[in-house]
Image (spheres, rainbow, N blue to C red):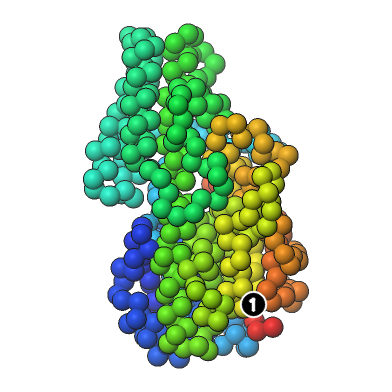
Amino acid sequence: MQQIAGRPYWVVQFDQHGALTSGTQGALAAEIAAAGVSNLFLMSHGWNNDVAAAEALYGRMFPIIKAQCDLNPDVDDIGFIGLVWPSILFPDDPGQAAVPTGIGAQSIEAAVPSPVNVTTRKTGGEITAAMARSFPGDQQDVLVEMGRLIDDGLRHTTAGDTTEVEQAADVQRFHTLLQQLVGPPDGATEDSGEMSLLASPDPVADYQRIATAMATGAQAGDAQGIGSIFGTVWNGAKDALRVASFWQMKNRAGVVGKAGLGPLLEALHGQNSQIRVHLIGHSFGARVVACSLSGISSAAASPVASLLLLQGAFSHWAFASNYPPNGDNGSLLGTSDRVHGPLVSTFTQFDWAVGRWYPKASFLSGEDAQSEAPSGRWGGMGADGFQSSQPAAGFTVVSGQPAYPLVNGTFHQADANGIITDTGQSAFAGAHSDIVKDEIGWLAARVALPI
C-alpha cells in the first residue's frame, strides 16, 4: 500500500485479458478491507496511457478529489485505487489538426483531423512502431510488415512504377494482416456493424471510403490516375489500422472491466460489505468501469456506490433499451442496479475526440456509413451523455460548490460545456482530457455523497 494526499493508495494492474498482475485478488481485497477505508475512489485511465502516464494522472487527480472531499465530511475515511490496463497507443499525424468550424456538430461531416501538409504525416513504419508495445510479441512481425506495405505502397504510388493489379494485391495482403492483428472481439461489441470492416470483400474501395471520411486522401496537386487512387487507398490503410486498433482497444477495455475489475469489486464486497466504491473512468477508462458492472454477479454482491464517467469514449446507448435505428438494446442494459447511488456522465462540445473522431471510427461499417447523422447511432458518451437510459435527469457542471440534484439509480447527463473547454490541450482531441480541475473533483465528491 502507498499513500497519496495522505490517504491509502493502491495501483492495480490488469493485463489485456483482465487478469490481475499486481498481486492476487484475495490478498488485495483483504489488504484494502484492513486499511479502514469507507469510501474508495477507483479511477481508470483511457487511451494512450502507459503506466507512468496513468500514475501521473492519478497523482494530479486524487489530491484534488481529497481536497474536495474534505469539504464534504460525509465522504470520510477515503482511499484511492489507480487502475492500470494496457491501452493501445494511437499515434496522431503531426500534420493534422482538428477543424474548429462547427464545434460540437454530431454529424459525420464534422471534420476531425484535417491534413494541412501531406508530407508531414507519420509513415506506416512510425505508426506500427508506436503501436508495437501494446501488442504481444508474436504480432510484432505482422506490424512490421504492415508498416512496410504502407510505405512501399505510397512510394510506388509516387514513382508510378507498379501496376494497379500489383497495388491491389498488396492492399489485400495488408488487409489479411489487419485481420490477423485484430481478430474477432473477445467481448461484446456495442453495435452489430462495428467490426464489418475486417470482413470487407473489397478493401481497395473501403480504404478509399475511410480516407475520404477521415479527410486523409490524396491532396490537391497529387498525380492523377492510379497514383491518385492508391495514394488515397494507402492513406486509408493507415486510417484502417488506427480504426481497427480503436476497436481492439474499446473491446479490451470491456474485457478488463468485466473479467478483471468486476470480480475484484465483488471480492472487495465479500471482505467488507460496508465499503463504498466510487467508480471514475476517463475516455476508454469509462468503458472499463462501466463494463465492470456486468462482471458483478448481482446488485447484492456489489460495493459500487456511484459511477462517474468523464468524457466516456463508448456508446451513449450502452445502457439504453430499444435504441435507433435497429431497436437494439445497449450492451450494459440491466447492469445499472449494481450502482447503489447516482450514475453520471459528463459531456462537452469541446471534446473533439469523442464528439467527432469517435463517431467516424465507429460508423465505418459499410452501408451504415450514412446513418449516423439522423439517428445518432454512433455517438459517444462524452458528446451528449447517456441516451434513452431510464430514469434520466440532468444538470450543468459549474464552478464553486453547488449541491447537484443527484438521485440514486438515475442516469444523469452532466453538461460540462462551461468547464471542460481547453481545446488547446490537443489539436486532435480538443478538451477530451481537460478533466484535472477543482470542478471535476467537487463533482466526484458530490456524486460520492450518501443520498
Residue sitting at x 59%, y 81%: 69
Residue 430 visible in the current orientation: no
Q: Is residue 282 above or below residue 323?
A: below
Q: Position of residue 434 (x, y in %)?
A: 58, 57
Q: Position of residue 86 (x, y in %)?
A: 37, 57
The reply, left or right, for residue 427 in relation to residue 325 is left
Residue sitting at x 51%, y 50%: 189
Q: Identify the image quadrant of the N terminus.
A: bottom left
Q: Identify the image quadrant of the C terminus.
A: bottom right
Residue 197 visible in the current orientation: yes
How many marks do you count on the picture?
1
Label 1, secondary structure: give it: loop
Residue sitting at x 57%, y 47%: 191
Comparing 134 with 91, the one in front is 134
Q: Is residue 238 above or below residue 408?
A: above
Comparing 179 with 242, the one in front is 179
Comparing 240 with 325, the one in front is 325
Q: Position of residue 435 (x, y in %)?
A: 58, 61
| Location of residue 230 by image quarter | top left
The reply, left or right, for residue 265 in relation to residue 368 is left
| Location of residue 85 by image quarter | bottom left
Comparing 71 with 45, the one in front is 45
Residue sitting at x 51%, y 80%: 301
Q: Is residue 163 above or below residue 268?
A: above
Q: Position of residue 181 (x, y in %)?
A: 34, 41
| Residue count near mark 1 (Cα–Cα under 10 Å), binned few <14, some 14–19, many ≥20 | many
Amino acid identity at mark 1: Gly
Mark 1, residue position: 341
